Amino acid sequence: MSATHALIQLLGAVSLLLWGLHMVRTGIVRGFGTQLRTLIGRGTANRGRAVVAGMGVTMVVQSSTATALIVSSFASGGLIETMPALAVMLGTDVGTTLVAQILSFDLSLLSPLLIIGGVAAHKMIGGMAWRQLGRAAIGLGLMLLALKIIVRTSEPMRDSPVLEAVFSALSGEPFIAVLLAALLTWLAHSSLAVVLLIMSLASTGIVSIPLALAMVLGANLGGVIPPIMATLNEGALARRVTLANAAFKTIGVLGCLPLIGFLPDLLQQIELSPARQVVNFHTAFNLAIVLVFMFLLPLAARTAERLLPARDDADMPGHPQFLDAATLDMPAVALNCAAREALRMGEYVEEMMRGVIVALQAPHKGKTSELKSMDDVIDSLYEEIKLYATKISRQEVDEPESRRIAEIQSFVTNLENIGDIIENIADMADRKDAEHLRFSDEGLAEITKLHAKVADNLNLAISVFMSADIGAARRLVKQKRVINTLERRITEKHMERLRQGRRESIETSALHMDILRDLRRIHSHITAVAYPILDAAGELKKSRLKKTA
């Protein structure tokens, strides 16, 4: 086998290992993500339980990054304090080492059994949980297969003079080896995958034990980068967790790196197998970090809180409160988050509806400025929810979840349009005040009556969105005819006052008609909320509602 051929096979095997890890993580998180989140939430009563909870969840998910994102989202939402969150993070690092310990044994015979069983569970057994469990089994089988290919492919590479020169040079530069492994881990988004690769290369003699140990330190250091990158745009509460955990690892790596030359003899006394020596070092390193920093967690938490004080970003109106990035791998949970944020957006639109009639009834410059600021909030939430829903749609979703994504996107789009129209009405209120215009008593009463009907139906639309009640959706659509009839009657009355030569009606006629038009437009967006729900239930004909019996 040529060196090029062997290198291609090795890269393919590494890619297969990463894909297997991805399948295990997504299968477990999608099938049992809610239970895992509950386990983390209940396991933070004290530091010891928090470490065990983080260890257990990471062993199941086989991804410390996934666990870190869940913990960070809990911290960001104020559901977990900084100190127990850091304890969970210490446990996640140990969890990855225990998975590596298991995979370091020769389990290649299990690979075909896991793949066969996984395919059977995914294709033949009904139920989302079984399908995702099958996905995880297939992923684990692929990981074992990939490890076997890596070992088999790398054995002939021991005699390559190029590789010997490269690794010999790295052996004399442990700091560069650490940085290289950290970079590989960041690119792979998996410290477990890189540690397993190092273990496989060490088992065939391509990588010396001192170099392998330095690269394991690099893999541990690189493993903290993806959670940091994922929480950069989150609040200080989330970043405390990932940055403090990175500080633990950095201190550990700097403290352990000078000892690399003395450790191989010690590890050899425990086990002779190079692969086992690498994995044992990986476990010992993370256990040492737990033992050292477990007692320093109160100090670490206070330091993190002082360096990263909680800001009011999460309380800012335009900042989403329920869009939890850690739930994106769990579409059912993520959709609930998106729906809650959409409801919050609906509350701002309702507040705008209440405020705009106040601005129309009497001069109120402060109220119109408040309405325009509120529209900026709605625009911001719309962009955040739309982006979040798009990310959910990129996951593996079933048909009901796909429909719910469409309903959420339709709902927030209509809310955003309503906010823009209300802002337009607020501009007309400013113009009325600036030109010292006044509606006739009858005209203002008619606008107020139409506005009240539209506002009531906005409340009904929000209820329809949350409940998906077919009867309420039908009532909402039928209200379109009621509103159109009312708007037409109000227009006729206004025209009658114009024929009578009423000065106030003549002066405000353009404003009056524009406001009626905008209220009707708002109601069109309100009734549009019901259509996706009625369409999914088969309650719509091509152009009108089906008649009820």
Image: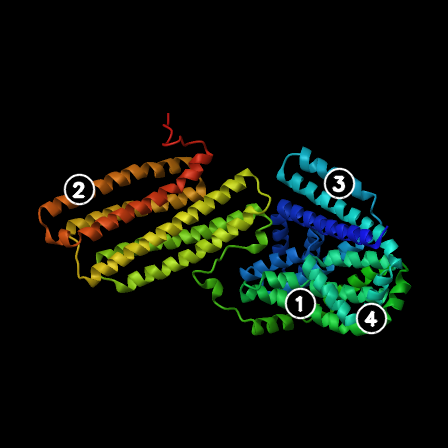
Marks 2 and 4, the one that precedes in the sequence: 4
> Measured from the top left, where is residue 214 in percent x and y?
79, 67
Residue 294 falls left or right of residue 41: right
Query: Helix, strand or loop at disc 1?
Result: helix
The residue where tag 4 is placed is 260
Foreground tag (1 vs 2): 2
Q: How far apart are labels 4 and 3 at the CA level? A: 39 Å
Q: Residues within 10 Å of mark 2 (few under 14, many from 20)?
A: few
Residue 174: quadrant of the picture: bottom right
Where is 470 relative to 166, above or below? above
Where is 28 relative to 187, above or below? above
Marks 1 and 2, the one that precedes in the sequence: 1
Can the viewer see residue 359 in this picture? no
Q: Residues within 10 Å of mark 1 (few under 14, many from 20)?
A: many
The residue where tag 3 is placed is 115
Residue extending furthest toward the top: 549
Can the viewer see residue 342 in this picture? yes
Marks 3 and 1, the one that precedes in the sequence: 3
The residue where tag 1 is placed is 246
Marks 4 and 3, the one that precedes in the sequence: 3
Residue kind at label 1, given as amino acid type: Ala
Point out which mark residue 492 bears.
Answer: 2
Residue depicted at x 25% and y 61%: 430
